[in-house]
Image (cartoon, coloured by chain):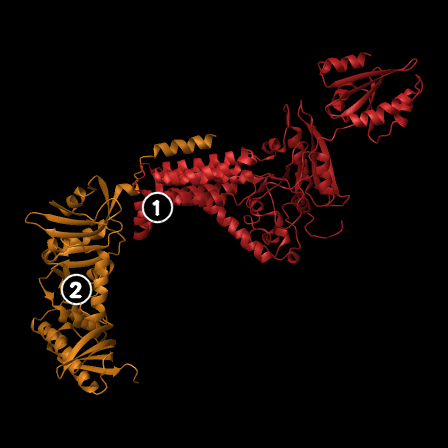
């Protein structure tokens, strides 16, 4: 009896433990953080339930902390962030305040593997009803077809951010006419945005791209090709940087008589894209872009400095084999 | 006679006390009996008829009565207190002298016969069950254990009821100090009456047993016989169809009678299921409350949305909802036990179907809560022991409160308390968690996982020094 009384007293003493009933929470799916002239603004999109429609809230605050403090209650209910799916950061915010943002996200949303994206126009994005599921579907589709975007979670970004040899970059999207488009890859702390082709080359060189589609036109006839990246190697020797890409081709179209020409065309296109990207990096003497770091990471085992890359001659060797042919 | 007057006075001239004097020349014999306890047929045909044919003189009256009345339970009584006792036991008394009487067993058949077990029904195995007659119950056990080593010690407990209590054990197997402990505990009982063996439980249990039962009550003779062969002690109370078995360990409550009549693989599976039912019964409502009030991140988003949608119209907290549902279930179960069988389907339909459906429609409880509490309650009913079911119910409520205040952390704390309680509980000073903790290899093959019968060659050394099964002593 004494034990029961003791347990009862303990429970009453400690009954101040906060708890939230399910019907008193609004589950936040997506947030967007942007910068105003003297502070920040925050978009919040909640998940629709039977009684509540999907709702977007916009608040402003002087600091990131005060911004979230104001959104503790959303229309008399508690904002629940633990199922947050996507964080979209305004592009201009990443050019200067990235460190503050990333550390804040790390503290605020611990252990959450949410999707990270950036966009030049947050208002346009939140004017649509695109949620995390839509974004994931879009990214998967875009990854499989054009290879211009790659899913980036906060964990991956944070790992890159902490690595002194890495330069973190976030996929950038735009919303036009209620539809999402890939804008490219925004490099953190810089105003640089790689365009779609450059982003794809980056993913290809860093082996993040395994499969994509490409349409090649020969004799006014369009051929749809599936390209599989079987591995990329980068070597430095005699002041020459040799990039070897081994790939596999496949097509649903009748390509038996055009295989050689298709190989040449796709090789030329990819080579041009990679050379253009690397040449730009060499010209700008960049030392910390994701592309530089990808290459440097691959050649540093060969005890080469990053300067070697800037002086090097580029050779790109792409070898194709057709699916079903050994 | 003065003795007869004393008896009449002692019984307050009860209307069922029959006092009938018979006279010979110099001899007076008075028949005294309690007509509600004695068989009138037996008294008329075998006592009165023969008595009237006798010719008694002051010299031969005791010998004549003793020899010519046919009964194997005739006792000469010299003490009035004894006479009261025998009248209450259903004996007919022939008072033939001052302070001298002859008690002849003439008990009426007040038993309901040997029926089937209600609370421990089995598919395989014998169907007979104990009834309220101690002798019948002992007979049912002796019919299974035909051994001279099966001892029965008796004592009477209860100042007013003088209930006969039997202590039964296998003399060659049982640990004698356990028998002594039981006897001491029973002899210490000072109470007005023992109306059922359930009353004895509290006296037989060790101190500091907080949640779990340590004395098992069963109405199955085969289960008692099996327990006696393991070295346990059976306590049988007159007027109770439940025999107590002690010491009883935690794993014993996971066992069923027909576990010993089926393949060991199947039994192991069923015992694992029962253990899962034990955990589900205690923890499932608490886990639901914890994850819906404190740890929502532990639920996948789609499931969380589903839960949220179901709870939208419920105005109460998850704890209140769970308590409401649990208490409703307990009331329904209680009324199901107490009500006449003819009303069974009406209560079930009203309580189970209509009320449940209406409560959801009225927005008092959510459908998921019905599922959670139902799973938990049904799992709790996987045990035949009412005490274990009650323990599970208490723990379920306790865990729900812990979960409401502290979430999953509270369940961890509650689980810790549960484990501490289990490991500190003892039965006849033996560890309740045996043979798991302490690990007893001889008995582990019949704990949760059951090994083949022919491989279990040793008894539990905690219960006996004679650990080898099948050995002559």
Q: What element carries label 2?
A: loop
Toward the viewer: A80 or B376? B376
Q: Which chain wears orange? A: A
Q: Distance between the residues labelled 1 and 2?
A: 39 Å
Toward the viewer: B410 or B114? B114
**Does residue A31 lie above or below B49 as drawn?**
below
Q: Do labels 1 and 2 share a chain?
A: no
Is B428 placed left or right of B152 in the picture? left
The residue that appears at 42% across and 34% down in the rendered structure is A7
Is B287 placed left or right of B471 in the picture? left
Q: Can residue A300 be seen in this view?
A: no
User: Which residue was labeled with disc 1?
Assistant: B291
Where is residue A324? Give x, y as percent: 30, 82
Q: Is residue A101 visible?
A: yes
Toward the viewer: A89 or B465? A89
Is B150 placed left or right of B68 in the picture? left
Q: Which chain wears red? A: B
Quarter occupied by residue A176: bottom left
Where is residue B175? Give x, y as percent: 68, 42
**Does residue A93 lie above or below A232 as drawn?**
above
Q: Which of marks 1 and 2 is in front?
A: 1
The 10 Å Cα crowd at callout 2, few under 14, some 14 to 19, many 20 or more, is many
Where is residue B190? Give x, y as percent: 64, 25
Disc number at residue A167?
2
């Amino acid at each position: 009896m004494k034990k029961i009384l003791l347990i009862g007293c303990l429970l009453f003493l400690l009954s101040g433990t906060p708890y939230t009933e399910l019907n008193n929470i609004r589950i936040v799916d997506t947030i967007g953080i942007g910068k105003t002239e003297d502070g920040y603004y925050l978009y919040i999109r909640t998940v629709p339930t039977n009684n509540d429609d999907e709702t977007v809230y916009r608040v402003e605050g002087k600091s990131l902390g005060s911004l979230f403090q104001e959104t503790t209650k959303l229309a008399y209910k508690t904002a629940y962030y633990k199922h947050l799916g996507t964080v979209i950061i305004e592009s201009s915010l990443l050019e200067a305040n990235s460190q503050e943002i990333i550390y804040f996200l790390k503290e605020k949303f611990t252990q959450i593997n949410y999707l990270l994206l950036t966009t030049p126009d947050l208002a346009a994005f939140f004017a649509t009803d695109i949620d995390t599921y839509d974004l994931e579907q879009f990214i998967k589709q875009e990854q499989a077809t054009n290879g211009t975007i790659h899913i980036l979670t906060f964990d991956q970004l944070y790992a890159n951010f902490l690595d002194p040899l890495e330069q973190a970059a976030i996929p950038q999207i735009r919303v036009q006419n209620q539809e999402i488009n890939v804008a490219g890859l925004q490099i953190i702390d810089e105003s640089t945005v790689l365009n779609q082709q450059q982003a794809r080359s980056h993913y290809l060189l860093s082996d993040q791209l395994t499969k994509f589609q490409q349409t090649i036109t020969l004799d006014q006839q369009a051929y749809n090709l599936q390209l599989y990246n079987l591995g990329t190697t980068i070597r430095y020797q005699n002041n020459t940087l040799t990039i070897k890409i081994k790939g596999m081709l496949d097509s649903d179209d009748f390509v038996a008589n055009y295989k050689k020409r298709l190989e040449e065309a796709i090789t030329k296109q990819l080579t041009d894209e990679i050379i253009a990207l690397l040449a730009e990096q060499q010209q700008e003497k960049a030392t910390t872009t994701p592309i530089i770091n990808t290459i440097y990471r691959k050649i540093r085992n060969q005890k080469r400095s990053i300067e070697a890359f800037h002086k090097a001659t580029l050779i790109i060797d792409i070898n194709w084999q057709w699916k079903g042919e050994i | 006679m003065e003795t007869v007057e004393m008896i009449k006075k002692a019984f307050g001239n009860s209307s069922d006390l029959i006092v009938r004097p018979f006279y010979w020349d110099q001899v007076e014999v008075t028949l005294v009996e309690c007509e509600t306890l004695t068989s009138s047929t037996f008294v008329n045909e075998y006592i009165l008829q023969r008595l009237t044919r006798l010719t008694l003189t002051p010299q031969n009256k005791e010998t004549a009565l003793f020899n010519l009345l046919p009964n194997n339970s005739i006792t000469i009584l010299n003490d009035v207190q004894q006479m009261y006792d025998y009248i209450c036991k259903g004996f007919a008394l022939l008072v033939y002298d001052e302070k001298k009487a002859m008690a002849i067993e003439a008990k009426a058949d007040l038993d309901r016969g040997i029926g089937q077990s209600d609370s421990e029904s089995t598919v395989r195995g014998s169907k007979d069950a104990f009834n309220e007659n101690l002798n019948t119950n002992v007979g049912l056990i002796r019919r299974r254990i035909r051994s001279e080593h099966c001892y029965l010690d008796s004592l009477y407990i209860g100042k007013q009821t003088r209930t006969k209590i039997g202590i039964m054990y296998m003399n060659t197997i049982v640990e004698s100090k356990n028998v002594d402990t039981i006897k001491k505990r029973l002899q210490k009982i000072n109470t007005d009456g023992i109306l059922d063996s359930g009353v004895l439980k509290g006296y037989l249990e060790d101190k500091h047993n907080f949640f779990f039962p340590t004395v098992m009550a069963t109405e199955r003779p085969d289960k008692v016989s099996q327990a006696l062969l393991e070295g346990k002690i059976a306590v049988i109370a007159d007027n109770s169809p439940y025999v107590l078995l002690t010491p009883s360990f935690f794993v014993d409550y996971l066992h069923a009678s027909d576990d010993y009549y089926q393949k060991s693989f199947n039994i192991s599976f069923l015992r694992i299921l029962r253990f899962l039912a034990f955990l589900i019964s205690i923890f499932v409502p608490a886990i639901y409350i914890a994850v819906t009030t404190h740890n929502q991140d532990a639920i996948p988003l789609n499931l969380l949305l589903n839960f949220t949608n179901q709870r939208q119209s419920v105005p109460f907290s998850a704890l209140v909802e769970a308590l409401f549902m649990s208490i409703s279930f307990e009331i329904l179960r209680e009324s199901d036990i107490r009500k006449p069988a003819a009303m069974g389907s009406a209560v079930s339909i009203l309580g189970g179907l209509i009320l449940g459906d209406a409560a959801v429609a009225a927005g008092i409880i959510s459908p998921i809560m019905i599922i959670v509490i139902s799973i938990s309650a049904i799992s709790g009913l996987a045990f035949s022991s009412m005490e274990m079911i009650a323990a599970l119910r208490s723990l379920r409520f306790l865990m729900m409160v812990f979960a409401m205040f502290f979430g999953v952390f509270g369940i961890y704390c509650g689980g810790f308390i549960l484990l501490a309680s289990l490991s500190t509980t003892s039965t006849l000073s033996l560890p309740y968690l045996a043979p798991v903790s302490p690990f007893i290899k001889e008995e582990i093959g019949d704990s949760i996982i059951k090994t083949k019968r022919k491989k279990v060659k040793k008894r539990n050394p905690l219960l006996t020094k004679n650990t080898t099964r099948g050995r002559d002593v």
